[in-house]
Image (tube, rainbow, N blue to C red):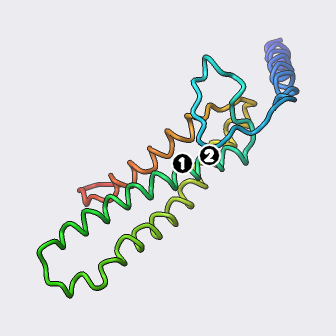
Amino acid sequence: MGLCRARSTYVGLMSQVSAKCRDYPPSDYRSPRFPLLYWPPHEKNYAIYSLWDSWRFTATWTLIIYVLFHLSAAAVALFMQIGKKRSTWKYIWAVPVIYVVVGGIEAVFAGSIVGLVLGAVYTSGCYGMSTWIPFIWSWINALMLVVSSFSIQGGL
């Protein structure tokens, strides 16, 4: 008796999920423009529904934020050279370039992994993702990079 009841409950839940996913993504769905950060309660037309858009938004925001963090670290490195011999400044221009290239490579990897996972989770649940979610996860990526750069006992 209990098994039949559990089965009918499961079938009922699955029919609700499949009915919800039948209209996923909406027929009038268009990819939102990139830097768009809308406020979800007011504008429901700008959600992210595809794995491609989730990856694109997350990877791009991560790239922007990582480059900003790496440029600020390069600026600190350049300021530390003030007052040193003139010969030191001969190759110092390479520091920001190297920092930006390394930050860009890190951002592509981190943003791709997080963007694909986010997209897979939201797509599998047939949910629309706010454009704030990739932006926030890009900040989480950057803050994890900062935290993991410190040598801490038992760190990450």
| Residue with the most extreme left position | 83
Q: Is residue 79 above or below residue 86?
A: above
Q: Residue at x 45, y 69 (%)?
A: 102
Location of the C terminus (image quadrant)? bottom left
Q: Residue at x 49, y 53 (%)?
A: 64
Question: Residue 37: where, in percent of width, then height?
Answer: 57, 33
Quadrant assignment, res 78: bottom left
Question: Residue 18: where, in percent of width, then height?
Answer: 85, 25
| Residue with the most extreme bottom position | 87
Q: In the image shown, does 7 or 68 lie closer to the viewer?
A: 68
Question: Residue 71: where, in percent of width, then height?
Answer: 37, 61
Question: Of the residues shown, which amino acid type is indicated by label 1?
Answer: Trp
Residue that label 1 marks: 61
Q: Residue at x 45, y 51 (%)?
A: 65
The residue carrying pointer 1 sits among few (fewer than 14), some (14 to 19) or many (20 or more) residues within 10 Å by Cα, namely many
Q: In the image shown, does 57 or 86 lie closer to the viewer?
A: 86
Question: Of the residues shown, which amino acid type is indicated by label 2?
Answer: Phe
Q: Give the SS element for disc 2.
A: helix
Q: Pointer 2 and pointer 1: residues touching (CB < 8 Å)?
A: yes
Q: Give the SS element for disc 1.
A: helix
Mark 2–mark 1 distance (CA, rounded to whole Å): 6 Å
Residue that label 2 marks: 57
Q: Please indicate whether residue 75 sits to the left or right of residue 109 in the image.
A: left
The residue carrying pointer 2 sits among few (fewer than 14), some (14 to 19) or many (20 or more) residues within 10 Å by Cα, namely many
